[in-house]
Image (spheres, coloured by chain):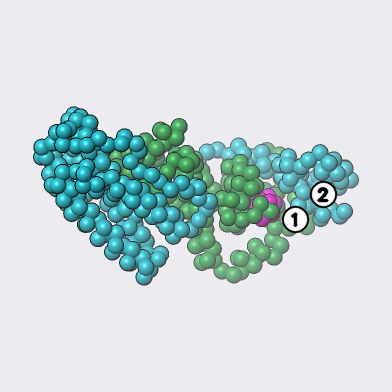
Chain colours: A green, B cyan
Amino acid sequence: MRAVDLELAQRCRRGDAEAFEELYRAHAGRLYNLVFRMAGSADEADDLLQDVFLHAHRKLGSFRGDSSLGTWLYRLAVNHCLDFLRGRQAKMTRVTDSLDEDGASEPAAASPSVPTAVSRIDLERAIARLPDGCRAAFVLHDVEGFEHNEVGRLLGVSEGTSKSQVHKARMKLRAMLSGID
Amino acid sequence: MSCRDYDAQIGDYVDGAMDEAQRASFESHLETCASCRATVADFSVICAASLSLEPQVPPPHIWRKLSAAIEAEPKPFFGVGGTQWWRAFAPVAAMAVLVASLSWTAAQLTSVPGQRLATRTPVTQSEPVSILAEYQLAERDLSNTIDGLERIATDRTSLDMETADVLKANLTVLDGAIGESREALKKEPENDVAQESLFEALRNKVALLQDTIALINEMRKGNQEGAARIVSGLNQ
């Protein structure tokens, strides 16, 4: 597997366009799922995926085969998404930030109840409405299936922070899917 | 314990991340707390639905835009297809032509170790780091690779004078580009253009050295066919 990855990376480094397309076809689907949900919008996901692969194309010289190409690309994509989210957050107003910080994640006063057959469309929309920080942790944990310690490593936060962010996201989703928020 | 004290444990319970004692304690709380039971039920629904979300398919236009953007990128030295890189790296092309015209025999060449040509400093795959740090890591890795390659490729006993001179001239061009990029980065460490230029020049230097050494090895083995194949690759 690694030998195949190294060979593909080597071909890409040499400017083999077919090799790079092969790389794209093999990994674009998984990375698009990630960037789509991390960004919360299709338009931004399109740009992000393109940027991730463009960045990968430039950085393939640093791929040493310590991990699989898929893992290497995935980390690259997560880092790229985080840079994007930080940039976007920096542009957001303090009003939005403070709403996020001061208890908007607490359970609503009324007792919410999520329909047992929640529609995927509703869930996608609700995930897109989450604040960036807790959406990133939620996507990596609940959608992508990483453990909290792995999410912490990917996001550069502690395991405890990952847990609290995921909890916060679930509470918000619960409120949204119950029609309370 | 109040209901709120259990709040943080709901996630662990839903994720199946509790040990038996914790689970038993939490479940006895659930028996008496309708609010926590409702939260657990809702979280379970959300988790199950999240894991079964439909895959998103990247629209075709992304690849079209990406391939166009890559086509506009500077090409590596010995890439396949495209013509712009020849203009950018004409000195290397000249070297390839010169090397192809060299008359050589196995007798002129001493034996060469067949070991791997490059020794790289093992670096643990990085955790999320800044782009600047990634470039510094990549630069260090490439520089280490270059040191190892350069020792072999520029060994005058392994090369005839003419090839060595051409190689030296081309390395001078690349070292100039590397030096300029490093100077620019000293002034602006996060300058994207300078980072990309440095990275590209280092990669190009690695490629030049690797191909030169591969050619030397084939020549030493007296493998004219192998050497011709490399020279042909250089000329593509």
Q: Is residue A160 toward the left or the right of residue B159 in the image?
A: right
* Secondary structure category for the residue under label 1: loop
Residue at the location (40% across, 64% down)?
Answer: B190
What quarter of the picture does the N terminus of chain A occupy? top left
Residue A55 place in picture, x, y as percent: 39, 51
**Residue A150 in the image, given as x and y percentages of width and height:** 60, 46
- The residue segment tinted magenta is A161-170
Q: Of the residues shown, which amino acid type is indicated by label 1?
A: Pro
Q: Position of residue A116 (x, y in %)?
A: 71, 39
In the displayed structure, B106 sits above or below B168; it is above
State left or right for residue A34 relative to residue B155: right
- State the residue in front, B19 or A122: B19
Q: Residue at x 48, y 41 (%)?
A: A67
Residue position marked by numbered label 2 in the rendering: B35
Judging by the rendered image, the residue that carries numbered circle 1 is A107
Q: What residue appears at the point 55 percent right and 38 percent down from the top-left corner?
A: B54
Q: Residue B211 is drawn in which quadrant?
A: top left
Q: Is residue A25 magenta?
A: no
On the question of residue B109 being in view, the answer is yes
Few, some or many residues within 10 Å of mark 1 (<14, 14–19, 20+):
some
Report how far apart the C-alphas of labels 1 and 2 lie in the structure: 10 Å
Task: Please tell me whether residue A165 belongs to the stretch shown in magenta.
Answer: yes
Indicate the chain on which mark 2 is placed: B
State the predominant SS element of the stretch in magenta: helix
Q: Secondary structure at mark 2?
A: helix
Between B35 and B204, the residue placed more toward the observer is B204
Q: In which chain is the residue bearing label 1?
A: A
**Amino acid type, label 2:** Ser
Q: Is residue A21 visible?
A: no
Query: Could you tell me if the residues under marks 1 and 2 are in contact, i.e. CB atoms within 8 Å?
Result: yes
Image spot of residue A78 (x, y percent): 51, 50
